[in-house]
Amino acid sequence: MMGTALLSAPLLLAGVVALSPVAAHAVSQAEVDGFVQQVKSCWSILPEDVGSGLSVTLRISLDRDGSVTDTEIVEVFESEIGERLARSAIRALVQCAPYDFSTDSYEQWKQLEITLQP
Amino acid sequence: MTLITRRNALKLGLAGGALLAGSSMAMAQLRIVVEGANFQPLPIAIPDFASSDPAFGKEIADIVRANLRRSGLFLPLDPASLPIQVGDPNGTPDFNTWRTANVDALVMGGVERGGTISSSVRVWDTQQAAQVVGKSYNTDPNSSRRVAHIISDAIYESLAGGTGYFDTRVIYTAESGPKANRVRRLAIMDQDGANVQYLTDGSTMALTPRFSPNGDMVVYMNFADGNPQVYLLQLSTGRQQRLANVGAMTFAPRFSPDGGTVVFSVEQAGATNIYSVGTGGGSPAQLTSGAAIDTGPSFSPDGSRIVFESDRGGSPQIYMMGSGGGNAQRVSFGQGSYSTPVWSPKGDLIAFTRQSGGQFNIGIMNPDGSGERMLYSSFHAEGPTWAPNGRVIMFFQDPGGNDGPKLMSVDIWGRNLLTIPTESYASDPAWSGLRA
């Protein structure tokens, strides 16, 4: 099932971080909440896709200034709606940058795996 | 659900950025879920189309921009504000330039008028630096507006999914003159209000026109015989004939999805029942019986069922039966009385008129009657008709008093309420399918 491995990870809650135990400087909950709100403010989908029940998972690379340097689709349902969702999600993540994370914890947030659910 | 790996994401053209072959990304340390998205019209850049006649290239682009803006799903940017004013349908855009201008969706088109009108269009996703769709067409030299509508449909389909609805026509009852002595005749126009033609001369009243699936035949109510009777009119020849000889009055006609049958209502001895008849002739078959008023039949898009209005239970409600008649089941259960049910071409919704509390409403429901929601409410509004993509509904609204009715449209999410410009008062709209 799509997303099962991701979403059943015991430390993963909606909008909250799964931390690596070796990170010396951790990303804060406030930074994650800010990131989520910022992406949501940019993310636009068609009215009929709102109730589709589908989601898309992306992996993004970020520069120290919070800009997005690379995007990769990890998982999306292969369909016309899935393609639209992926395209709109990538657009939102790229357009909404730069994101505000502390440079002290850059090693932790230089790559993010993001699941977007309408 | 299918997992998309990086390799087949590239094949789908969805992988973004500059991934090097064979590179591997380190396991992400953070996983974040973002829930909830809003709808905003998609900003889209449409420079004027390239053409040896720049005015023609601008004219076509103007129609495309107007269509997409009117859909409510797109926000065409002011062409004067764009990095370039005239598009290049053959080259690859400088994506950096467009990204810097905050343009995600870009349309480059070209159009030339000669023995035919040849046109081409490419839609680009500037974030992905990839073409979304590329198409070219050759069309009748007298159909320049249709070129713009066909291109609008291609853009709409590539970015909004489903099918478009711009290359369509609307037939309606054009009304003119004082309210006490109104002249009503049939008119047909493009969906954006252009190219109006009048099909009857107004000497006798004509109401409720409905298209055949191929768009060349129309059924409507003709009062030339005194009592209203259903007539078939062929648009390409202007020929018409009475559909059937049955009952005192016949009305509320609609074609079957294959165009071979017309269902209609027949008034006889105080009762109104639904009949069907082949468009090639033959005896009408009676589909409902009883003393009630059964009217407004509409086929499901697969032709297997008919939804209709009946007051057999005491007040007008929506019922459903097989296309052969019999065993009708009630599907409307909300407050008020229901009328004019019309099945969406997609089969997933039924539009209707509902009266309650002194107000008229245009609403939609699932075919089993669940999920009822109102899209528009007014002193007097009725008679929904569907765009062929099942996302937009047109109807007429009458403000009352000495004023006359007008055509309006709304999408199935209750957004984007529009008035359709007509040179006369207008009622009873029927939307065609996509033109062949």
Image: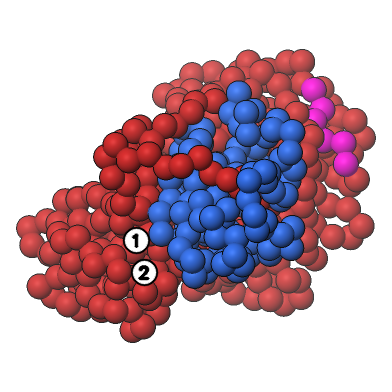
Is residue B176 shown left or right of residue B96? right
Taking the spot 20% from the left edge, 78% from the top edge, the residue there is B55
Instruction: Return the x and y of residue B389 as percentages of the image width and height.
Output: 50, 44
C-alpha separation, residue under disc 1 versus residue under disc 2: 6 Å
Is residue B122 shown left or right of residue B193? left
Q: Nearer the viewer, residue B132 or A93?
A: A93
Q: Main secondary structure of the magenta part?
A: loop
Q: Supply the letter of whichever chain is blue.
A: A
Residue furthest out toward the left: B115
Q: Residue B152 lies in magenta, yes or no?
A: no
Quarter residue B401 falls in: bottom right
Q: Is residue B65 above or below residue B132?
A: below
Mark 2, residue position: B99
Taking the spot 89% from the left edge, 60% from the top edge, the residue there is B358
Mark 1, residue position: B126
User: Contact, CB < 8 Å: mark 1 with mark 2?
Assistant: yes
Q: Nearer the viewer, residue B327 or B89?
A: B89
Q: Is residue B433 above or below residue B258?
A: below
At numbered mark 2, what does the secondary structure look like: helix, strand or loop? Answer: helix
Amino acid residing under circle 2: Arg
At numbered mark 1, what does the secondary structure look like: helix, strand or loop? Answer: loop
How was this image coloured? by chain
In the rendered structure, which segment of residues is drawn in magenta?
A: B329-334
Taking the spot 74% from the left edge, 33% from the top edge, the residue there is A10
Q: Residue B331 lies in magenta, yes or no?
A: yes
Instruction: Return the x and y of residue B230 as percentages of the image width and height.
Output: 55, 39
Q: Is residue B168 above or below residue A7?
A: below
